[in-house]
Image: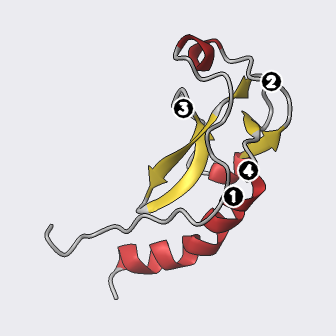
């Protein structure tokens, strides 16, 4: 098992927990900010995690800083892209990272 596989295995449960927190079309905000974003699943190290729909940088690799909320979307970038609510409704979303061909 290579290092990427071990890292992906270690992050599988936290990524699933993050997806579960956002189940039900909840919007999200970055810890320490009052701006509310539409939520879209984003690929991260071969896993899918909820993130800002506008793809604004989070300032870290810590996807757990993105918190669910029932507040309406206030992010200008999300709104101008037509993202007025979250699209993620929950359920299993898993990407695989295939490095065998690399």
Tell me which residue sits at (56%, 77%) in the image: 10
Residue receiving disc 2: 72
Question: Alpha-carbon distance for marks 4 and 3?
Answer: 19 Å
Q: What secondary structure is marked by label 4?
A: loop
- How far separated are the C-alphas under marks 4 and 2? 14 Å
Q: Tell me: residue 46, above or below residue 59.
A: below
Among all residues in the image, which is located at the extreme bottom? 1
Name the quadrant containing residue 21: bottom right
Q: Which residue is mark 1?
A: 18
Asked whether the residues under the numbered discs 4 and 2 touch, taking CB atoms below 8 Å apart as contact, a structural biologist would say: no
Determine whether label 1 and label 4 are within 8 Å by CB: yes
Q: Nearer the viewer, residue 50 or 5?
A: 50
Sort mark 3 into few (<14), some (14-19) or many (20+) by Cα contacts within 10 Å: few
Q: Nearer the viewer, residue 31 or 40?
A: 40
| Helix, strand or loop under label 2 | loop
**Circle 2 residues within 10 Å: few <14, some 14–19, many ≥20:** some
Residue identified by numbered label 4: 22
Alpha carbon separation for disc pair 2 and 3: 20 Å
Residue 86 falls in image quadrant? top right
Closer to the chain start, of discs 1 and 2, is 1
Helix, strand or loop at disc 1? helix
Q: Is residue 28 above or below residue 46?
A: above
Q: Residue drawn at (66%, 22%), measured in percent from left and top? A: 84
N-terminal label among 2 and 3:
3
Reading the image, the residue beneath label 3 is: 57
- Of labels 3 and 1, the one closer to you: 1
Distance from disc 1 to disc 4, alpha carbons, whole Å, reads 7 Å
Marks 1,2: beta carbons within 8 A: no
- Labels 3 and 1: the sequence-earlier one: 1
């Amino acid at each position: 098992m290579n290092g990427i596989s071990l890292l992906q295995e270690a992050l599988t449960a936290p990524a699933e927990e993050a997806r579960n927190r956002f189940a039900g079309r909840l919007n999200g905000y970055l810890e320490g900010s009052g701006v509310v974003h539409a939520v879209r699943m984003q690929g991260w190290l071969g896993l899918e995690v909820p993130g800002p729909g506008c793809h604004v940088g989070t300032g870290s690799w810590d996807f757990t800083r993105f918190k669910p909320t029932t507040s309406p979307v206030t992010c200008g970038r999300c709104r101008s892209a037509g993202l007025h609510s979250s699209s993620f409704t929950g359920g299993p979303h898993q990407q695989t990272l295939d490095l065998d061909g690399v």
